[in-house]
Amino acid sequence: MTDDSYAAVMAERAAIVRDSVGLDYDRYTCGVLAFDYERLLADTGYDLDTARAVQRSTGVGSTPLVELRNIAALVRCVAPPGKGARIFVKDEAANPSGSFKDRRASLSVHAAMRRGYAGVAAATSGNYGAAVASQAAKAGLRCIVVQEAFDSGGFAQPEIAEKTRACEGYGAEVIRLSVGPEIFYVFLGVLRDTGYFNASLYTPYSIVGIETLGAELAEQVRAQTGRFPDVVVATHAGGGNVTGTARGLAKAGATETAVVAASVDLAGLHMASDRDFNRKSFTTGHTGFAMPFTTWPDRADVPRNAARALRYMDRFVTVTQGEVFYMTEVLAALEGLQRGPAGNTSLAAAFAIARTLDADRIVVVQETEYTGAGKHPLAQLNFARQMGIEVRRGDPRDNQPGHRIVIPEDPSQLAVVDVDLDEMRRLYLRRALDSLPPGARASETDLDFLAADTRTTRARLEELLHALR
Amino acid sequence: MTATDAPVAAGTWVEIHRVVLHVHERAPHIPDDTRAVPLELRVKGFLATAASAGDEVEIVTSAGRRVRGTLIDVNPAYSHGFGSPIPELAPVADEVRALLRGRGRTA
């Protein structure tokens, strides 16, 4: 008889994760804090070409790159003379389950199949669950998706209700839970009892699978315009999107392209709160994930997170919920594309950024996602009202997460708020110092790792560390 | 949820519910409002043997697992949708098209 208690399952955590991912993360340790990140990724056995081949065989990737000429024209209506960059979007909704998450799921499911696992499991309330379910269906593997889905009143977020339907539509078992971080305990129990592969969002497979997106868009922009993009904007939550896209851009040679991470501002709403759960009108791409994962990526469900956003972002900005809903309307009205809304976080940021750039510059929004019942501004705003949230037109600066959603009155009101990357670095380094075992000192290898992981120089790192001590 | 407690035939697609962690079993370091309520689970599958709503039952899930819980729904509906148009969003399309026309651009 196995012990299913919370304490017993959590005590087995390390062994369950090791067996379910099939990776011995200890092999990559090379300092007190440092690990060999590149070798962890290389040991997946997939490089850009083999990842593309796997994805081609399951209908993933090779999505269209669409120039948003009318939205760029709208930017120029509200930009100073000579300003207003060209904007392109990578229409990732064209993937089999309707989002770029198919890229992340494809290599995990392929690895699970190759290594003889009977099924795959993932803990996710978002598009990733549908992606894993879709890829598993094609591979003939069983699939279990564990969702945080409803509050104590039984109310399900409409967007998550749609993901439940999508996953079940692909033949997955969907375990729906009420609010709380103990979803991880339930997920570990499922992995232990089934012996399924852990298709975590944070394994190296998940990240290598996104590199194809960055590489594809670099090649497509060059084919259409004769050069690489100046700026790529990626919606940022757990860090995989930013990490994989930036790595793919670099592998395609687009080393001068600036990578901007964009998140919806949900400051003040607690991610583990039963009450706040349904007062968030976005289920991902928001600061509730982005802030903790940027400042401490190894909080993930695997010992070493392969998604390390701070390593790759040149800039980190936030936008408001109302601005994203507004841009979702604009995308449909001017470009004939109903997508998102969550994927349009980066589009709202791109609009504001394009306004500040010269007209010959190129900004790429690197994803869209499918829209549908539950996943639409109407569904989200009707639900917000039902939860007592005020929805009105006005200045988006009056937005107050969980209380008020303000739909802009004019496109000139769209703006990004920059997150101070040095503050992100300080928070990261504080956690790193706190995690040092008693009496241990960071070695040269550790310091080099920390500099790379926070995208800074050794000299600047030493200054930041000195100030913290 | 069916209105009656009429027997549900074995093999019917149903939803079950159970409490995974009672209030006193919840993890440390969670907000007070979350700690005040149990962690609940719902999952769907085919009913293993005939039962009535509210009974403790076993189902076979899409992954082939046998899971036990209280029968709470029969052939559960997907009820999420779009809802009414949002008056604050409705004018946006015309507004931005007018802006483009004003600049002599085609929208």
Image (cartoon, coloured by chain):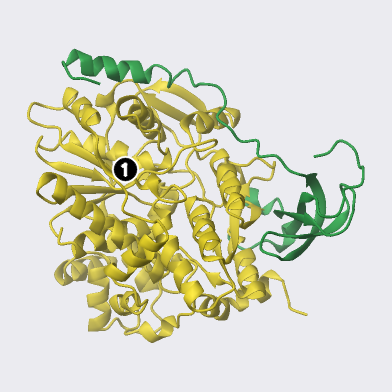
Taking the image as shown, residue A145 lies to the left or right of residue A292, namely right
The residue at which mark 1 appears reads as A346
Question: Where residue A73 sits: x, y (%)?
Answer: 19, 27
Q: Does A211 appear above or below B52?
A: below
Q: Which of B100/A336 is in front?
A: A336
**Mark 1, residues whose alpha carbon is within 10 Å: few (<14), some, or many (≥20)?**
many
Give the quarter of the figure containing the C terminus of chain A: bottom left
Question: Where residue A361 sits: x, y (%)?
Answer: 12, 41
Instruction: Identify the residue shown where x is 36% and y is 61%.
Output: A56
Instruction: Identify the residue shown where x is 53% and y is 31%.
Output: A379
Image quadrant in which you'd find residue A242: bottom left
Secondary structure beneath disc 1? helix
Image quadrant in which you'd find residue A344: top left
Q: Chain of mark 1?
A: A
Q: Which of A457/A102 is in front?
A: A102
Q: Residue furthest front?
A: A57
Taking the image as shown, residue A299 lies to the left or right of residue A352, namely right
Instruction: Identify the residue shown where x is 23% and y is 70%.
Output: A452
Q: Which of A37/A102 is in front?
A: A102
Q: Which chain is green?
A: B
Q: Which chain is yellow?
A: A
Q: Is residue A362 visible?
A: yes
Give the quarter of the figure containing the N terminus of chain A: bottom right
Q: Which of A466/B2 is in front?
A: B2
Q: Residue furthest left?
A: A82
Taking the image as shown, residue B28 lies to the left or right of residue A219, namely right
Question: Where residue A279 sits: x, y (%)?
Answer: 54, 38
**Amino acid under disc 1:** Ser
Question: Where residue A189 sits: x, y (%)?
Answer: 65, 70
Instruction: Identify the residue shown where x is 12% and y is 56%.
Output: A256
Q: Is residue A230 visible?
A: no
Q: Does A386 appear above or below A227?
A: above
